[in-house]
Image (cartoon, rainbow, N blue to C red):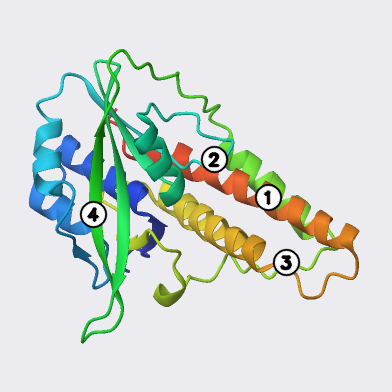
Amino acid sequence: MASPELLALPRAAVLMLWAGAYLRGDAGPDDAAQHALGTGKDRSGAEGVELFDWLTGLRRLPLVQLRLVLPVPGRIAGLVGPPPAVQAALAAEQALVVTAAGIPDHTLVPEDTPVSSLQGPIALVDWMQYPAPLGANLAPASSSGTAREQLLRVMQRVADSSQDLDLVPDEPIPARDLPSGWARTMPPRHVTAADAHLLTLAGRILALSAQELRAGSPTARALADDQARRRLLEELRDAAREALVETVQRAAGPEG
């Protein structure tokens, strides 16, 4: 049987998948913490929480639940504060919010510090924990369960448009081109083939569309062309983000 394809995802999504595997009993805390770091040469930093301790601490929380948030300026729904947590989540464009019996307990945000090593560039990864403010509320998840269909519709509109987008979602993203704060991981064994494929697709589109938005178009003939191109890329990015979050939430949830 062929080995499953590696997933390229934001670190918070990788950690949530493996935390879900640990809470289901499919992985021990050592293995889950190691897999959450990704398959590259990255190392745990000296600051922040130890993932082993964090994972085992989850079992002491009543009715613990995890929520993945991939915020951008103007779209911070799902974050609970305090302000430093929101600022860190926006800077990293990702966070995990942990609740106990429906009450926000804390937020976890990864911080990557690039360093040089004999093996080449690596990142030191620190997971910073922010206790939730007393009395904080977490709005119900807004997922409609249709993020996959919405992503496919947007992809079809892009395919039918005349805009020149340099996106190849069927090809893996080379490790050297991964966005900062992302990692490659094997999917935990409880993740279905369908969910793994959707995570692969959504992750690639999110990373590539964000990269294209930052780079701009050197071939746009007029401002109107550039604006139309940006609107399509923003639609792709937003649809991919929603599909990624929805799929991780489903895949990392308790065994049904």
First in residue order: circle 4 vs circle 1: 4
207 to 172, vertically: above or below: above
Residue at x-position 38% and y-position 60%: 7
Q: In the rendered view of the protein, which quadrant contains the N terminus?
A: bottom left
Q: To which residue does mark 3 refer? A: 165
First in residue order: circle 1 vs circle 2: 1
Q: Secondary structure at mark 2?
A: helix
Q: Could you give the CA–CA distance between mark 4 and mark 2, rounded to whole angstroms? A: 25 Å
Q: Amino acid at mark 2?
A: Glu
The picture quadrant where one finds residue 122 is: bottom left
- Nearer the observer: mark 1 or 2; the answer is 1
| Cβ–Cβ under 8 Å for marks 4 and 2 | no
The one of 4 and 201 positioned closer to us in this rendering: 201
Residue at the far front: name it.
Answer: 84
Q: To which residue does mark 2 refer? A: 242
Q: Position of residue 157 (x, y in %)?
A: 77, 51
Q: Could you give the CA–CA distance between mark 2 and mark 3, rounded to whole angstroms? A: 21 Å
Q: Amino acid at mark 1?
A: Glu
Numbered badge on residue 84: none
174 sits left or right of 240 in the view: left
Q: Could you give the CA–CA distance between mark 4 and mark 1, rounded to whole angstroms? A: 30 Å
Q: Position of residue 59 (x, y in %)?
A: 11, 30
Q: Could you give the CA–CA distance between mark 3 and mark 4, rounded to whole angstroms? A: 35 Å
